Image (cartoon, rainbow, N blue to C red):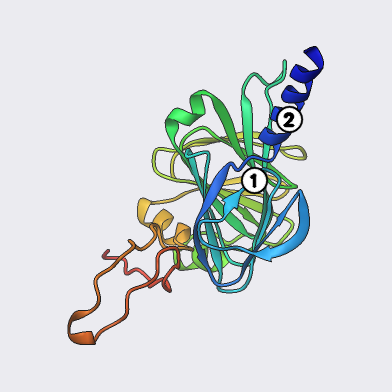
Amino acid sequence: MKYGLLVLALASIAFNAYAGVGVVTGVQGDATVRHETAPQTKAVRFKDEAFWLDTYNTGARSGLRLLVLDKSVITLKELSQMQLREENATPTQPKRKNVVNLVSGAARTVVEKDALKDSDYEIRTSRAIAGIRGSDLIGVIGTALNDQLQRAGLPRVPNNNCVAFVTGPGSTSGVVAPQVGNTDMGPLDLLIVCDQFTHNPVSANQFDDISNFLPPTDPPPNLPPPPDGGGTPPTPPGVFPPSTPRSRGD
C-alpha cells in the first residue's frame, strides 16, 4: 500500500514538473521555442502551451506574447531570447519566484498586483536583476531598444555590455547589479546599468512609445468582413498587425 502511494506521489511530482504554466496569446513573424523535455526547436503557434524552462527566440520583425499562470503577460521583442523559470520557496527565499531569464533583446512583463502577494517576479540578465514590485517592467539587453529610446528623446544604452530597465506608470523595482550595487526604481524611470547606475525620468507618453514593440492588445476574433467586400481584410486572432508610429498628439 505504501509502495503504491509512493508511486502516485512520484507520478504527481513528475506531472507537475511538466504541466503547462501558460499559453501563447499572440505571435508575429518568426518565433521558436525549445522545451526542456524535447530539445528540438519548433515554431511557436497561437494558443501553444508554455512550460517552465521553455526557451523562446524571435527573429527579425517578429514578436511573441505569453500569458503565464493567468497572472503575468510577457511580451518578447524581435531578435530576443528568454527562458521561463520558477524557483521554489526556501528558508532564505520565503516566496516562490517566477523569473524571465532574458538572454538577449528586450522583454516586457506586466504582473497582476494581487499575484505579488504570493510570488516574487523578476527579470534576470547576466549583468543585473530587476525585481517587479509594481506591475509593469521592461528589461533590455544592450542596444535592443535604442531606436525607440532615441525616438522618445531619451538616452541610448551605450553598448551591448550594458543593460537597461524601464518602469511603467505606478510601477517600481529593486535592481541588483553585482559589480555596481543596489538601487531602487520609482514609477516611470529609465535605469541604464553599465559601470554605474544612471537614472532618467520618463513621461507616460515616452513609456508608451518605447514599450510599443508589439501592439498592446491582440486583435479580437471573429471580426466582421469589410463592407461591400472592400477595405482591409480582418486580422486572424493571435497575429499582430504591423505597428503604426504614434504621433505626440495621441
Q: Residues within 10 Å of mark 1 (few under 14, many from 20)?
A: many
How many numbered discs?
2
Furthest toward the right, the residue is 3
- The answer to whether 88 appears left or right of 189 in the picture is right
- The answer to whether 84 appears left or right of 135 in the picture is right
Q: Amino acid under label 1? A: Phe
What is the x, y in percent for residue 209?
Answer: 42, 61
Q: Is residue 128 above or below residue 61?
A: above
Q: Could you tell me if residue 37 is visible in this image?
A: yes
Q: Is residue 86 above or below residue 75?
A: above
Q: Is residue 35 above or below residue 40?
A: above
**Label 2: which residue?**
11
Furthest toward the front, the residue is 1
The residue shown at (69%, 27%) is: 88
Quote the CA–CA distance across marks 2 and 1.
Answer: 18 Å
What is the x, y in percent for residue 15?
Answer: 69, 35
Q: Quadrant of the N terminus?
A: top right
The residue shown at (73%, 46%) is: 127
The kind of secondary structure element at disc 2 is: helix
Q: Earlier in the sequence, mark 2 or mark 1?
A: 2
What is the x, y in percent for residue 172?
Answer: 49, 36
Q: Could you tell me if residue 190 is visible in this image?
A: no
**Label 1: which residue?**
51
What is the quadrant of residue 145 in the picture?
bottom right
- The answer to whether 8 appears left or right of 232 in the picture is right
Q: Amino acid under label 2? A: Ala
Q: Is residue 139 above or below residue 241?
A: above
Q: Quadrant of the C terminus?
A: bottom left
